[in-house]
Every structure is written in structure tokens, then in C-alpha cells.
Amino acid sequence: MSSYFLHRQLIVQSSRFSNQADPCFSSFSQKPAKSNWRKKHEEFIANIRAAKQAQDFIKNGGDVRDLPPPPPMDTSDLVPCPHCGRKFSESAAERHIPKCANMRHNKPAPGKAQKSTVRR
């Protein structure tokens, strides 16, 4: 047989295996999580508008202390670190949390006693 037919036969055989229910191939059938891009975009536009208003206010001789507070940010999609309390995206939290658990500043001091919850 020629190499062309051997190559075609290998392709057909490999396609038989890929069609079977295999956990390696099942990840492709999962739907991605819904993104809230519209909400994030509207928040971004509101922040840009607030920044432009602040720049115009300062340029016209206004005092920084008289500026209204910036619009609040929605951080519901961020994951808080249990050690330091900072908030991260999911991918950044996966990297940060193991490192933060090993840092010295997040541990109690060895000479200080913990507050006990037992009343005497």
C-alpha cells in the first residue's frame, strides 16, 4: 500500500476513537459561562465620563475636594482572598491565593497569643 492510503487509514481510525465518550473530549461540549460584557461596558463608560468631568472641573479652577465621589464599581465577579481580603479575577486568584497563604505577613506573630473566645 502506498503511504497515502496508510495515512488515510490512520485518520479514519483516530476519528473512531475521538467520537467515543471520553472525558478528554467532553470538555469541548461544555458551554462557556455567560459574560456580563454589557454591564462592564456601561460601567467603563460611566467611569470615563466621570473622569472627564473631573478633569474639566479641575481645569476650570475647581478644588479637588469639591468633586463628587466616583461611581461605585461592581466587584461581584471578583474572588476575595481569604488571607488578605483583596479581590481578584478567577485566573489571578488561582495564582495569588496559594502564594498569599505562605507569606509571613498573613500569619500571626509567634510571640503574641490569640484572643480566646472562652469567657471566664
Image (cartoon, grey):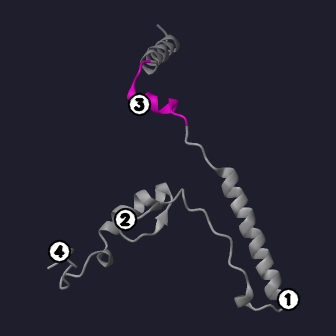
Disc 2 versus disc 3: nearer the observer: 2
Which residue is disc 1 drawn over?
60
Q: How many marks?
A: 4
* The quadrant where residue 108 appears: bottom left
Q: Magenta stretch: residue 26 in it?
A: yes
Graded by Cα atoms within 10 Å as few (under 14), some (14 to 19) or many (20 or more), the crowding at tag 4 reads few
Graded by Cα atoms within 10 Å as few (under 14), some (14 to 19) or many (20 or more), the crowding at tag 1 reads few
Graded by Cα atoms within 10 Å as few (under 14), some (14 to 19) or many (20 or more), the crowding at tag 2 reads few
Which residue is disc 3 drawn over?
24
Q: Distance between the residues labelled 1 and 3?
A: 62 Å
Q: In screen coordinates, is 25 left or right of 98?
A: right
Graded by Cα atoms within 10 Å as few (under 14), some (14 to 19) or many (20 or more), the crowding at tag 3 reads few
Q: Magenta stretch: residue 73 in it?
A: no
Three-letter code, disc 4: Val
Q: Earlier in the sequence, mark 4 or mark 3?
A: 3
Three-letter code, disc 3: Cys
Query: As drawn, which residue projects farthest toward the top?
Result: 1
Which residue is disc 2 drawn over?
82
Which residue is disc 4 drawn over?
118
Could you say whether the residue bearing mark 1 is in a helix, strand or loop? Answer: loop
Query: What span is in magenta?
Result: 20-31
Q: Position of residue 60 (x, y in %)?
A: 85, 89
Q: Which of marks 2 and 1 is nearer the N terminus?
A: 1
Q: Is residue 91 above or below residue 60?
A: above
Q: In screen coordinates, is 63 left or right of 112?
A: right
Could you say whether the residue bearing mark 2 is in a helix, strand or loop? Answer: loop
